[in-house]
Amino acid sequence: MKKLLQNSAFLSLLIALSAIIFGYWLLQNPRSTLAFLLTLGALLAAFMLDIPRWLKVLVGGAILLLVVPMAGFKNSFLFELGVQTGIYAAMALGLNVVVGLAGLLDLGYAAFFAVGAYTWAIFGSKQANQFMPWHIFPLPGAYFYLFMLVAVVMAALTGVVIGSPALRLRGDYLAIVTLGLGEMVRVLANNLDHPVNLTNGPQGITPIQRPPIDWFIGLFDRFGIHMSRAEAYPLFFYFLVLVIIGIVTLVNIRLDRSRFGRAWIAIREDEVAARAMGIPLLPTKLLAFATGASFSGAMGALFAAKQLYVSPESFTLIQSIMILVMVILGGMGSIPGAILGAATVTILNVDLLKTASDYLNDLRNAGFVLDLGIFKYNFANLPNQLEPAKYERMVFGLIMILMMIYRPEGIIPERRHLAEMKEKA
Amino acid sequence: MSEAILEVNEVTKTFGGLVAVNQVTMHVERRRIFAVIGPNGAGKTTFFNLVTGIYKPDTGSIVFDGEAITGRDPAVIAAKGMARTFQNIRLFGSMSALENVMVARHVHTKTSYADALLHTPRYHREEQRARDRAMELLAYMQLDHRAQELAKNLPYGEQRRLEIARALALEPKLLLLDEPAAGMNPQETEDLQRRIVGIRDDLGITIVLIEHDMKLVMSISERIAVLDYGKKILEGTPEEVQNDPRVIEAYLGPGAAEGVQ
Ligand SMILES: Nc1ncnc2c1ncn2[C@@H]1O[C@H](COP(=O)(O)OP(=O)(O)OP(=O)(O)O)[C@@H](O)[C@H]1O
Ligand SMILES: [Mg+2]
């Protein structure tokens, strides 16, 4: 059996078959959580296992570009899941540069997400009229793409502003200071509704313009697929997120394999030795910090357009921690790890825990009685407080503890981190 | 340009109440092999840390290649052409031997951030150049067969050589070696000795080395400075140092010199 599993041809067949079966199942039952997870499992297996590259591309393309979108038409929740996963994955990849490569513990990462989100929210809504002349706002939706770049720049600049004092500190001190400065951004967003109304304070900003998609609808029309605007936007954002993940991954890989990536890893491993080899400490750290921030900023702009609404509540410390959890769960410094971590946490968060809650609710409402002879329990008596969705944070806490005990290097460890961990052990 | 590549003038460094380096003055001429010796805790490594900028001296000044570098950032000093190795080997353990050497090519690689993102021709050219030079240096230190090996997996002697290869990648004018032969067997030490002379002769690099192996020190150094309790008690040729009673006392304790003579 073991030998069979090492046989590439057999593995390929297994993966191709499971992708087809699970994918077909998902198409037939777009609301089945199990079918969805198994389909993603096939995708993951295709990526991780030793099979020919063309098959990896084929399985990945078929699942991401055909199965999920087609199932998503019948159950648009899948798009929501996909887009959220994508946004978090891109942010996890950004934080991966900061924490994974450069070894800088940043607990204020959501601040850059906020900067990006507000950058588009303010100018892509009527909000900017509050403090700008001309009354030309909101800007037309086509400006969204430009503002994604603006958001990247703004977030990177914020990264430099926050990083310049913070990065002089190390380890725990850096974590605490970034936490504080990150919270400051949220507090600013909360309070900058006076004297000049920049952010509209706690009420937040809405509605926010979305990029125009007539061309997108037209494109599908030509292939005989007709969509309303409301149907097309989730699909559009899904594809947009896929493209962005592609770009962000490429950026990550390229930086990793450049002199900058080497400098970050050198600093992470030994600051003294890195400096003695001519690597300037603060500029190199700032570069990592700003790079990570810019990823977060871009996703913030996308988030604003997708949600149509931003408010300070979306950018709390818990958000920052959540993204850190994704990076650590997946494996610090590991690019596929960051994506997998983001997918795991998001799916657990918005799908699995809710599904489990719904399931228990159904049992309760039906008055289901569990009868094990000596032990009898009527689910009608199940207290509300026991819903898994309410235990989100505890579940993550548990996962993190188990990971730290059994697999501290993450699910898909990065070669170098693995080496470092073994060295310390 | 002055004859001395390194001029250290009356430099002092204290840690709390301990004077680790005390009013030390040292001038190292170009293309010399210069040794710093002294008993354990004499302040030799601290002296290196002062010269390379890792510590700031309390008083005194340091001039490197005609330029004052007192209190400058270690990365800036390194970029000016001063490289070093560490007594307690400080390689980047999770990187391959090749990557370790390439890290030190940082200042000589002219790739901008945009080049790295867009994979411009310049990126490919510079990356290739860095890799080629790193391979050359690995080969020079007889480590080319280890290029892809993780640094932490190399045997001790090879780690020491890798540190030298990495330091050479800075294309330094001055190379500081902190106990390069520590932990090596006699065969390795002999190879190392030849290599050090080669670095000076082939590459024209000035070398300052700290070493406890007296055979090595006496056979390759042209000048030797002796530190004891942070103070420089003597400087001279190997012959002068070898026969000086102060050196024997520093190593073996007061009164020892008489017993020897
Ligand atoms: N960072 C530091 N903080 C406090 N004391 C220090 C520090 N660095 C060195 N010392 C002390 O300074 C003195 C000189 O140490 P140093 O490492 O320079 O000696 P050394 O001559 O290199 O000795 P060895 O031959 O054992 O390497 C020692 O007493 C040491 O304990
Ligand atoms: Mg020492």
Image: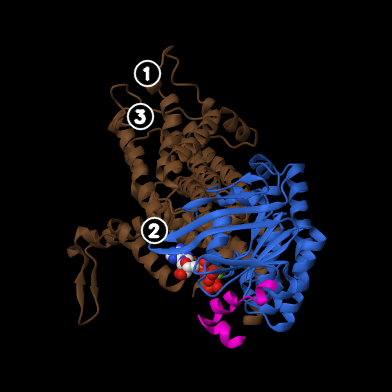
Chain colours: A brown, B blue
Q: Amino acid at mark 1?
A: Phe
| Tags 1 and 3 both on a single chain | yes
Q: Quadrant of the N terminus of chain A?
A: bottom right
- Residue B251 forms part of the magenta stretch: yes
* Visible residue check, residue A329: yes
Name the residue type under label 3.
Answer: Ile
- Of the residues under marks 3 and 2, which one precedes in the sequence? 3
Of B62 and A399, nearer the camera is B62
Residue beneath the point at 61% across and 35% down: A220
Q: Residue at coordinates 47% horizontally, 54% vertically from top-left?
A: A342
Earlier residue among tags 2 and 1 = 1
Question: Which residue is outermost to the left?
Answer: A381
Q: Position of residue A39 (x, y in %)?
A: 54, 60
- As helix, strand or loop, the secondary structure at mark 2 comes to helix
Vertical side of A295 occupied by A214: above or below:
above
Residue assigned mark 2:
A352
Identify the chain of the residue marked 3, using the numbered disc in the image: A
Report if the CB atoms under discs 1 and 3 are less than 8 Å apart: no
Tag 3–tag 2 contact (CB < 8 Å): no
Which residues, given as a range, are shown in magenta?
A: B240-261
Q: Which residue is mark 3?
A: A205
